[in-house]
Amino acid sequence: MKSPAVLAACALLAFASASRAATHRLDDSASQVFPPSAAWDWVPGSLRTGINTVHLNVRVVVRIDTRAWAGRQGQIYMVLPVDSDGRVTAEWRSQGRLLDGRLVSGERALVFSGTVRGPVIEDTLHVRLTADARTLVGDSQRLNFHFELDTP
């Protein structure tokens, strides 16, 4: 039987390990979207069929400030918060530094896992957004993607 001191030490060690794991929002304010203002396009034949799906294609030059995490292990996630405009699906292809992926508003998707190698992670994403036109409010929507880093 283990002594209470050993059990307490194990519990403290487990708590300390768990408390170090954290999620940090990363600064991606240097990222750029091209075109900066884009219009939703109806899916071909949608008016005839009654399908209300619209698409938007943009290119995003992603620049994530990682200088505080250089040399450390972590996972970076792209996050699309829930918006009052309804469900939006994002699918993207990268140039290779970040992972390709897909997410729906309210979710986050893994885009990087491993050792952060430098002060900035940069990649170009070709993003296709899909939404139900009935849920879009007004002519202009701002999608507030951001990136989070989980550290072990």
Image (tube, helix red, strand yellow):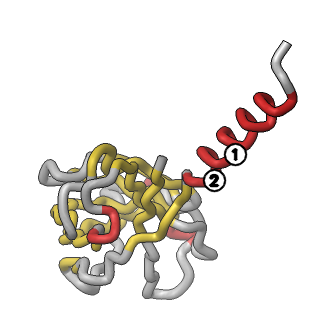
The circle drawn on residue 19 is 2
Amino acid type at image mark 2: Ser
> Which residue is located at x 24 percent, y 82 percent?
30
Specify the quadrant that holds the N terminus.
top right
Q: Position of residue 97 (x, y in %)?
A: 17, 52
On screen, residue 146 above or below 112: below
- Please identify the residue farthest to the top as the structure is shown: 1
> Which residue is located at x 55 percent, y 51 percent?
21
CA gap, disc 2 and disc 1: 6 Å
Q: Position of residue 35 (x, y in %)?
A: 20, 80
Quadrant location of residue 137?
bottom right
Task: For label 2, count other residues whose C-alpha is less than 10 Å away and answer few (under 14), some (14-19) or many (20+).
Answer: few
* Observer-nearest of 62 and 143: 62
Residue 48 can be seen, yes or no: no
Q: Position of residue 44 (x, y in %)?
A: 31, 57
Quadrant location of residue 17?
top right
Q: Position of residue 69 (x, y in %)?
A: 33, 63
> Which residue is located at x 35 percent, y 56 percent?
45
Mark 1 sits on what residue?
15
The circle drawn on residue 90 is none
Q: Give yes or no for contact between labels 2 and 1 (Cβ–Cβ under 8 Å).
A: yes
Amino acid type at image mark 1: Phe
59 lies left or right of 37: left
47 lies left or right of 58: right
Mark 2, secondary structure of its residue:
helix
Task: For label 1, count other residues whose C-alpha is less than 10 Å away and answer few (under 14), some (14-19) or many (20+).
Answer: few
